[in-house]
Image: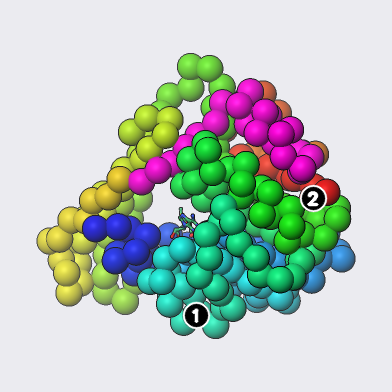
Amino acid sequence: MSIYAEEAELYDIAFDWDLSEEAAWLVERLGPDCRSVLEPGCGSGRMLAALAALGLDVVGIDSSEQMLALARGRGCDVFRADMTGFDLGKRFDGAVSVVSTVGVLGREGLGSHLEAMARHLEPGARYLVQQGVYSDGAELWRSEWEAERNGTKLYIVWEAIDRERSRSRVEILAGPRAGEVVEDEHVAAFWTVDSWRQVISASRFTQVACYDEGAEADLDRGGMLLWHELVAP
Ligand SMILES: C[S@@+](CC[C@H](N)C(=O)[O-])C[C@H]1O[C@@H](n2cnc3c(N)ncnc32)[C@H](O)[C@@H]1O
């Protein structure tokens, strides 16, 4: 079962933590002139809703109807579209991509995604992309956590299989589906520091900064959840 489609509701519970601080930090990075924001691969709309709560006009796209239905339930303006080639017929003041979402496109998909994004952003607009890049010898990543909502309690393990794929295992500990286990594998590309620099320099974007846990960081050191600040042409 796909955690991004048939089991999108479980994804939404698993990732439903408070994003208000991260959203406020993103608004600062997007700059004072940013009024409209696009989130490609917006999933269930959790970041869109957090940005809208701070007064921004937000639009999301995603390929999963189930994710889009959850985002609409949060009051978000969302469309079904492929991140690697889409045309919304308008430009935005800024954009964000959360939790290594561009990794789902694989290495080959990022270039065409950036080209589509360049066509949807005003010149000089910021595109903030959260994506892991690794330095030589870095270990494969693994996360485990618990989440609970309305009586449904989950234990989640999300881990890299290699540098191209990840697997998720969601054990339902309590609630109407208690005892079920939902497992899935996904494309989840990670870049080396060098291959990330190459893909950005082959695009029309310029990377001006990199952040780790809110502080400016050295891209050369890599990191699992780095934020890359890209500037649109
Ligand atoms: C890791 S999830 C992140 C969702 C959301 N950004 C969040 O923070 O919760 C990746 C999302 O990308 C979507 N997706 C995968 N491939 C896509 C594509 N080619 N075009 C648009 N969305 C895609 C999936 O449906 C899923 O909702």
* Local secondary structure at mark 1: helix
Instruction: Count neighbours of disc 2 (C-alpha within 10 A) and say few if under 14, some if 14 to 19, many if 20 or more.
Output: many
Which of the 4 image quadrants contains residue 92?
Answer: bottom right
Camera-nearest label, 1 or 2: 2
Q: Taking 104 as reference, is 142 left or right?
A: left
Q: Which residue is mark 1?
A: 72
Give amino acid for label 1.
Arg
Residue 18 lies within the magenta run: no
Q: Which numbered marker is on residue 232?
A: 2
Q: Residue furthest left?
A: 179
User: How many discs appear?
Assistant: 2
Q: Taking 44 as reference, is 49 left or right?
A: right
**Among numbered discs 1 and 2, the one appearing first in the sequence:** 1
In this view of the protein, which residue sits in the foreground, 141 or 154?
141
Q: Position of residue 209 (x, y in %)?
A: 76, 39
Q: Which numbered marker is on residue 210?
A: none
Q: Position of residue 5 (x, y in %)?
A: 34, 64
| Magenta part of the chain | 186-207
Give amino acid for label 2.
Ala
Image quadrant for the N terminus?
bottom left
Q: Is mark 2 within 8 Å of ligand 1?
A: no
Is residue 226 positioned above or below 198 on the image?
below
